[in-house]
Image (cartoon, rainbow, N blue to C red):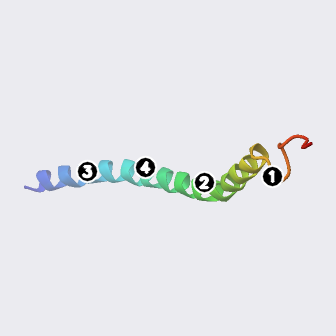
Amino acid sequence: MAAHTQNLDRLATFTRAPDTRRRTVEDRQARAADLASPVDQHRQEYEQQRQQPGPGQGQGLRP
């Protein structure tokens, strides 16, 4: 029985290490996405403003 318990402990150790690494990588990616989000939002707003003519623009000359 002791060998069985040791094998389960070993398996748990091997399983925990990659799981911890995966969580760490996912957390870093999530933080990076959160930090980049406001910048991307401002850029998108800027691009939308540049593409749409404002009042009095793009209407051409009136007789």
Report the residue marked by disc 4. Answer: 22
Image quadrant for the C terminus? top right
Badge 4 crowding class, 10 Å Cα cut-off, few under 14, some 14 to 19, many 20 or more, is: few
Q: Mark on residue 54? A: 1
Badge 3 crowding class, 10 Å Cα cut-off, few under 14, some 14 to 19, many 20 or more, is: few
Report the residue marked by disc 2. Answer: 32
Report the residue marked by disc 3. Answer: 10
Instruction: Mark 3 vs mark 4: give the one in front.
Output: 4
Q: Is residue 46 left or right of residue 63?
A: left
Badge 1 crowding class, 10 Å Cα cut-off, few under 14, some 14 to 19, many 20 or more, is: few
Please report whichever mark, 1 or 3, sits nearer to the chain's N-terminal start: 3
CA separation, marks 2 and 3?
34 Å
Judged from this view, the residue extending furthest toward the left is 1
CA separation, marks 4 and 2?
15 Å
Q: Is residue 43 left or right of residue 32?
A: right
Please report whichever mark, 2 or 3, sits nearer to the chain's N-terminal start: 3
Callout 2 amino acid: Ala
Picture quadrant where residue 38 is located: bottom right
For mark 1, give the secondary structure.
loop
CA separation, marks 1 and 4?
48 Å
For mark 3, give the secondary structure.
helix
Please report whichever mark, 4 or 2, sits nearer to the chain's N-terminal start: 4
Callout 1 amino acid: Gly
Instruction: Mark 1 vs mark 4: give the one in front.
Output: 1
